[in-house]
Amino acid sequence: MKKQIRMIKVKIILFFLAVVILGSSCRRVKKDVPESMLTGQATIAADEALQPLLNAEMDVFQSIYSYATVKCQFVSEYDAINLLLQEKIRLALVTRPLNQKEVDFFKSKSIIPESIPLGYDAVAVIVNSGNKTVALTISQISGILSGKLVDWSQIKGSGLTGSIRQVFDAEASGIIRSLNDSLKLNQKISGEINFAGGSKKVIEAVTSDPNSIGFVGYNWLSETESLNVQQTLNKLNLIAVSTSILADTTNSFKPTVGSLFNLSYPLTRKIYAVYTDPSASLARGFLAHLTSERGQKIIYRMGLKPENDFQRLVNIKSNF
């Protein structure tokens, strides 16, 4: 009996030794993966408003290249650009190209930066499902953001009274910068403003507050085949936007893949990959994926407009 117990103990010890050896060998294999455009590890940054799109792109890229690990820091647009300027990352996904001051900064360090357009997203305007507003003019949105329209009773057809509560993801948001640029607000957004701390929290705030109006990246709502997105849209009203003096069904457009393609939605904006490393790194490999046919089709599948339209050409013969 004692001999059997000793044998069992020996087997248990050998088993745990084997686990330790295999574990250490696995770690060595992972550590020894060479750094290249398709292998190794890379840390990038992206505007948090683009998170659903970037997650889809990273999932596909890493499923194809099993020895590649791309980690993305989802931050504000301002912080993503700053991480580039501090040389903590080499690739950032944002909704503006570098300005001349930023380009000159990199050139002073003998770095030639690239701002590569990838596709089109939009600023989506959302209200609570209890709000009867279906369309707003650019003038009305400007009035809300500038603090001239402060009560829902000033918006005809809203069916509400009370303060208009604006909800954004963050104070350094690319959404706010996009609205400033599109509507020429001179950086003067005012009124009752809440910074929710992220796009998902913006959506949650609007679904729980009938008097709120939120502004989010459309890619959070564009994948309409997703059950989660469908459930979210049932709790919200996605506002159509018009450039006319009065908004009606003939001149107002919601963000859709169609209205992004023909640019009829007034708050459409471009997505850029800003890159500052000419070496053959994994970050450049991921950038190549984003601009490839596969990467561009993911943008289209997400309900957005890709920069490059890959079309299948079919030659139909008249004689059979």
Image: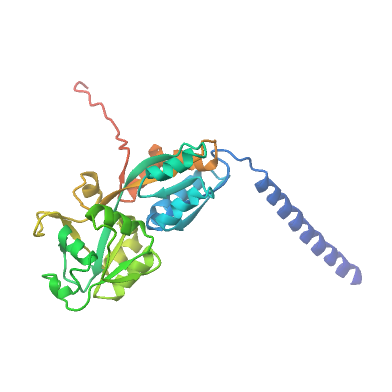
Picture quadrant of residue 239: bottom left
User: Quarter holding the C terminus?
Assistant: top left
Residue 312 place in picture, x, y as percent: 30, 33
- Kindly identify the residue that appears in the image at 77 percent across and 61 percent down: 16
The furthest residue to the right: 3
> x and y percent of residue 96 in the render?
35, 48
Q: Is residue 292 visible?
A: yes
Residue 13 in the image: above or below residue 65: below
Query: Looking at this view, is 234 or 102 the one in front?
Result: 102
Q: Where is the N terminus found, in terms of image quarters?
A: bottom right
In x, y percent, where is residue 244?
Answer: 10, 55
Residue 283 vs residue 1, the one in the foreground: 283
Residue plotted at (39% across, 56% down):
52
Residue 162, located in which quarter of the rendered image? bottom left
Q: Nearer the viewer, residue 24 or 249?
A: 249
Image point 24% across, 48% down: which residue?
260
The residue sitting at 37% across, 57% down in the picture is 49
Compared with residue 32, is residue 52 higher up or lower down, i.e. above or below? below
Q: Can you say whether 89 is above or below 2 in the image? A: above
Residue 223 in view, yes or no = no
Relative placement, left or right, of 100 versus 147 is: right
Residue 58 as seen in the image, left or right of residue 143: right
